[in-house]
Image (cartoon, grey):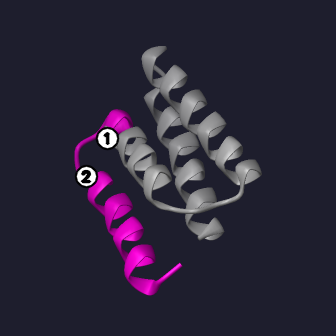
Amino acid sequence: MTRITAGAVAALFLMSASALALHCPQDAAAIDAALAKVEISDEVKAEVVALRDQGMELHEAGNHEESERVLAEAMRTLLTAI
């Protein structure tokens, strides 16, 4: 992967980390956008998608702090894979 692509993915994540609380949907959207643009193994992709889905389930259940933690883990997993 080129540095420009990696930089673009990193920028997506930084933009999603807004100063507002409860930014779970924005984080999930950033993960989805990054997944559409990067080439990673099916195994890593499945792990990231599972974490993303778990994070959104937590968000919908009202557990926003844990949701943000799980979504951040999904982002870290994705970033380390590229």
Task: Tell me residue 26's x, y (percent).
Answer: 31, 41
Task: Tell me residue 14's x, y (percent).
Answer: 33, 63
Q: Amino acid at mark 1?
A: Gln
Q: In the displayed structure, would residue 65 be above or below residue 72?
A: above
Give the secondary structure at mark 2. loop
Question: In the image, is 29 to the left or to the right of 35?
Answer: left
Say which residue appears at 45% left-offset and 24% top-offset.
59
Task: Tell me residue 4's x, y (percent).
Answer: 37, 82
Is the residue marked by circle 2 packed among few (<14), some (14-19), or many (20+) residues within 10 Å? Answer: few
Question: In the image, is 21 to the left or to the right of 56?
Answer: left
> Contact, CB < 8 Å: mark 1 with mark 2?
yes
Q: In the displayed structure, would residue 73 be above or below residue 29?
A: below
User: Which sits in the foreground, 47 or 57?
Assistant: 47
Say which residue appears at 50% left-offset and 51% top-offset.
35
User: Which residue corresponds to mark 2?
Assistant: 18
Q: Which residue reaches farthest top?
A: 61
Say which residue appears at 44% left-offset and 85% top-offset.
3
Give the secondary structure at mark 1. helix
Q: Which of label 1 and label 2 is nearer to you?
A: 1
User: Which sits in the foreground, 71 or 48?
Assistant: 48
Q: Amino acid at mark 2?
A: Ser
Say which residue appears at 23% left-offset and 52% top-offset.
19
Q: Is residue 67 magenta?
A: no
The first of marks 1 and 2 along the sequence is 2
* Image: magenta residue range: 1-25
Is the residue marked by circle 1 packed among few (<14), some (14-19), or many (20+) residues within 10 Å? Answer: some
**Residue 78: which quarter of the image?**
bottom right
Q: Which residue reaches farthest bottom?
A: 3
User: Which residue corresponds to mark 1?
Assistant: 26
